[in-house]
Image: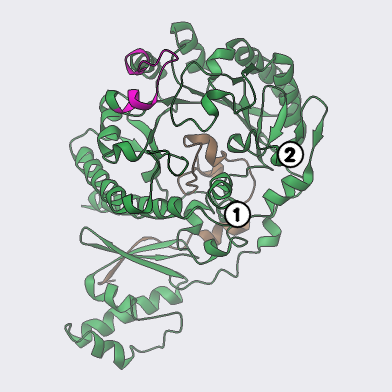
Chain colours: A brown, B green
Amino acid sequence: MKHIKTLTSATLKQTAAHGGCGECQTSCQSACKTSCTVANQKCEHNK
Amino acid sequence: MIHRYSKNGLNFLLDVNSGSVHVLDDISYEVAGLIDENMSENCPENIVNELSQYNADDVKAAYAELLELKKAGQLFADDDYIDVSRYIPTDAPVKALCLHVAHDCNLRCKYCFASTGDFGKGRKIMPFEVAKKAIDFVIERSKGRKNIELDFFGGEPLMAWDTVTKTVDYARSREAETGKKFRFTITTNGLLLDSDKIDYINENMDNVVLSLDGRESVNDEFRKTVNGGGCYDIIVPKFKELVDKRGDKDYYARGTFTAKNLDFAEDVVHIADAGFPSLSVEPVSADDGCGYELTEEQLPTIFAEYDRLAEIMLERRKNGKKFTFFHFMVDLNQGPCVVKRLRGCGAGYEYVAITPDGDIYPCHQFVGKDEFKQGNVLDGTFNLDIAHQFAGMNIYTREKCKECWAKFYCSGGCSAANYNSNADMNIPYELGCKMERKRLECAIYLKAMEQMEEEL
């Protein structure tokens, strides 16, 4: 494409099928303890 | 749903439901502002006319590219693939504990949400017997989940060192028999660290959170010893020793900023330069009128500071002095699945806090709020109604979240913050949301810059 550069293409939909195993880290435990950013967490399967 | 924003000459287009992120040139960015999900095959004349400053063929070409994204499911994607009801967990599979081994503290931080450590319930140390029951509780409740997290928290957990070490030993002793894997974290103010404790922590804790607010004057303004002195000079050398010996294992230096240091980027840089390049500095949770609370009026200053911090980080990256700021981290490709993004932190059903008396609360922020007490590990009670109330909340049950572009990044925010500001866990803490959205815009910008620099 000339006008658009895609940094990341659709990925959320693909994760719906295999997601939800619950093995990943609890987001609030990782560093913050007062606010949530979930999108910076790692998927257990992609570590 | 889409979100458009520009930052430092880069134009971003986020497709919320698919998670796609695109960088646009000026023409396509303007075209994107004039379209909706009902895109026709050909560029409508009104768009060409409205953007008459550009060559008509270029406008049409930009439109065609946007249409291509839409057809590929990367623009105006539907969220019909998300079956929310399927993802609401039942029966509270608790897999993470915030273990309050000490409701006591050897600091008197002015902004402490835990009433200087005792959560308003009296100063106590958790007996090992309570911790042991907590381990039994989480092993049983976690059911099929293998990984269990345990954060030693307080107050100040180093004041309950005997309980900490015995708890680690006990949890480890049950791993083989139960097939569980414990991951330990400890959150400490550092005062009681010594070489033995440092070595133990580095050996046994998967993550360590070290409380440090930044510059000495900033840190010591709020983080006071019992005698009223500052703690910076005591803790920083100990934190240094810990991090220097830690190798590649995770840690975070974690600070709080308040209305008194709205130039908090200086504190972020200070912490990084002090030898802690993995760090987090968070907005304070404070009552209105306390004098250091964050307000709507300060938002432009706070936003500008986040912008400044992003530029500092870019510069640092170029100069080989890179550091990691927790809230500017975002994984655009292999982050958490959409199911996790729907539900967020899991407080009350996947994650609970346990007090020195064995009382169970939805998380550390709810400790002491009697109406949220879920049970006790000593008598084996656990109120599933409260657990299910928490499990039932997600970005689709929170009306304001439904309409927010950031919902899959923040996952509905913090229930405790919502409750504290609105007496309703389903109504977002708006000031926090505004800062979160700003941080996300910065995070995506940094990611884009990083990706583009790598490609050069």
Q: Is residue B307 above or below residue B143?
A: below
Task: Tell me if mark 2 has few (under 14), some (14-19) or many (20+) residues whose alpha carbon lies within 10 angstroms of its own.
Answer: some
The residue that mark 1 highlights is B339
Query: What is the chain letter for disc 1?
Result: B
Q: Which mark is residue B2?
A: none
| Residue farthest toward the front in the current orientation of the protein | B289
Task: Give the residue type that dot 2 points to.
Answer: Gly
The residue that mark 2 highlights is B144
Residue at 47% over, 46% down:
A37
Residue at 56% over, 68% down:
B79
- Quarter of the rendering containing residue B351: top right
Range drawn in magenta: B218-234
Task: Out of B313 and B40, give the one closest to the viewer.
Answer: B313
Residue at 31% over, 48% down:
B302
Q: Residue B175: percent from the left, percent from the top?
A: 69, 23
B238 sits to left or right of B147:
left
B456 sits to left or right of B208:
left
